Image (cartoon, grey):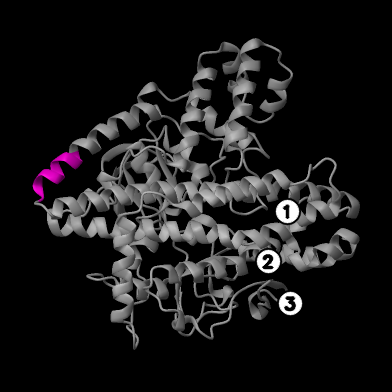
Amino acid sequence: MGPWKRVGEQSGDGVWVGTDASDRFPIYTRGNAGEVYPLVYRPLSFSIAQEASERAMRRAILTSGLIRPDELDGIPLSTAVGSGVFGGYAYLNLSIQRRAAARVPGGDALDADQGFLGAGDPPPHVPLPGEKNLRASLAGLRYILKLTGRTEIPELDADEAEIAEYLASVPDRETASDLELRGSSTAELIERFSGWFETHLVVSFGAGALMALLTQMCEKQLGDPTIATRLMSGLGDVDSAAPSAAMWDLGRMIRSSPTLTAHFDRGVAGIVERLRDDDAGDVAAFESRFGAFLDEFGSRGPNEWDTAFDTWETDPELALVLIDRMRLTDESHAPTVQHERLAAERAALEADVLSQLRWPTRKMFARVLRSARFHMQARERAKTTIVKAIHGARLGSQELDRRLAAKSGGERGDLWYLIEEELDDYVADPGSFSDTIAERRRVHAELAERIPPFYFDGTIPPISEWELRSNQLEPVVVGETITGLGGCAGVARGIARVVLHPGDPRGLEPGDVLVAPLTDPSWTPLFVPADAVVVDVGASMSHAVIVSRELGIPCAISVQDATRRIPDGALIEVDGGAGTVTIIALPD
């Protein structure tokens, strides 16, 4: 299962999840990991995912040849070489990514920071003996050349077929026994997850390598590295952006129907029941279309990688809140309109860029560009594939949790405060774990009150020294400019809407600027009515950048503490190319 450690001083006598830090590769970051697991791990989620993830990470790391197998020899799985959990929060190992980047021909160790960190003040890179390795560099060169010629990924096709088979084998929730639900939703997922996750990582590493190479070529050949991002805009077939188009159509249905409009004007809370009780024809048509939407995209939602959290299928109001925002948006924000505009701009830019390059540079540039686009789309497809599998396990776990909480007199969600090895005993006698669950809930709440360090070197600071989320920061003043990194070029001015959760019912009005801590695919529909996006953390491969490129809206990433310093309602200007946010006026 992986380590299950006491954290001692960090949370009294409580037991919590944690991995060991590596002496050989000591620098860790929340970058990228924070998008997948933004909140504190529940014990069950940790026990299902951590060891399988670490195995997958190690196999994927070796794929490029930039890291040699002997460099991982003797490091136990309880030591986070790829991914780890510290103080209940997910981290990635930055040191090993830096070593791989240092061995790319023409590359530098700090190139890895662009993909994982964004801005900030990360620990310096200290080259260790053996960092430069000719054999590894040659292997890496062969790997990149192979990537540029790839036009299909058979492993991804195989995973999609296997996941479809797994989902078909999940027993019916209404008739399955408790033990059948327990086996299909936890034990079987553990057995299969590592292979699926490895495919996702291999594709992701390939996309990152190609994007870095494309950026490097744009800088050296054209003098402007930001051209790489513009050449990746409006690609289409990006899975994480796909729900937005379907939600847009549902929003148009509401907008054109007085009956539906009246229902949504009353608010989203309770709307599922209200629509069910209304037999009007346009309501029935909407429910049918919304049902088809859930069949296709119901696995998506906040924190969708963790079975502990609801998705659009298990809590439809999470999706209806977003659709409600869509219906208030004018036609100029339609995803199809934006895509057509961006596709035309991208095609014109590509033709202009290629005309400036001489053969054979032009040929190589075109090849790298084509492959970078293919891998970026494949990365999102691989992510979507795994999320569907996790959702299948979620449905069984939620039903099992409901049953056992009813038997023990406990709370919904108790299941996730057990570890996988305890589940058989919990199914047999759920009431016997009440004290254990109560203590772990206490520790979870304690950890959730703290902000984990974005990166650390060697030893993570004691949890008692982490900043409290309740701490107030110095607010911005008119005329102040906060600087992060450019995610998607363009300049927009609008009202800041500070949104901490994608299901926030306050709403995002057309022309507003979305200010968020970070985003995952469940946030994507909020990008549609927004004129710009600002996120606290993020890097060149982050979700906010990918979706902003698809929709063609300015995006500033890694604008540290933006959600804590910019007040909701402030008038701000976002320069997505420079990565800056300027305060124009404060709310009354």
Taking the spot 24% from the left edge, 56% from the top edge, the residue there is: 215
Report the side of 165 relative to 521 (left or right).
right
Q: Which segment is the magenta one?
A: 349-357
Query: Residue 356 lies in magenta, yes or no?
Result: yes
Q: Secondary structure at mark 2?
A: helix
Q: CA distance from mark 1 to mark 2?
A: 13 Å
Q: Which mark is residue 185?
A: 1
Amino acid beneath label 3: Asp
Front position in the image: 171 or 289: 171
Image coordinates of residue 328 in percent, x first then y, are 47, 24
Image coordinates of residue 478 in percent, x first then y, are 30, 47
Front position in the image: 227 or 318: 227
Q: Which mark is residue 47?
A: 2
Q: Secondary structure at mark 3?
A: loop
Amino acid beneath label 2: Ser
Placement of 588 over or under 78, stated as above or below? above
Placement of 119 over or under 322, stated as above or below? below
Taking the spot 65% from the left edge, 49% from the top edge, the residue there is: 309
- Tags 3 and 2 touching, CB below 8 Å: no
For label 2, count other residues whose C-alpha is less than 10 Å away and answer few (under 14), some (14-19) or many (20+).
Answer: many
Image coordinates of residue 132 in percent, x first then y, are 29, 82
For label 3, count other residues whose C-alpha is less than 10 Å away and answer few (under 14), some (14-19) or many (20+).
Answer: few
Residue picked out by circle 3: 13
Is label 1 or label 2 in front?
1
Taking the spot 86% from the left edge, 59% from the top edge, the residue there is: 427
Q: CA distance from mark 3 to mark 2?
A: 20 Å
Q: Quadrant of the C terminus?
A: top left
Report the side of 469 relative to 101 (left or right).
right
Q: Secondary structure at mark 1?
A: helix
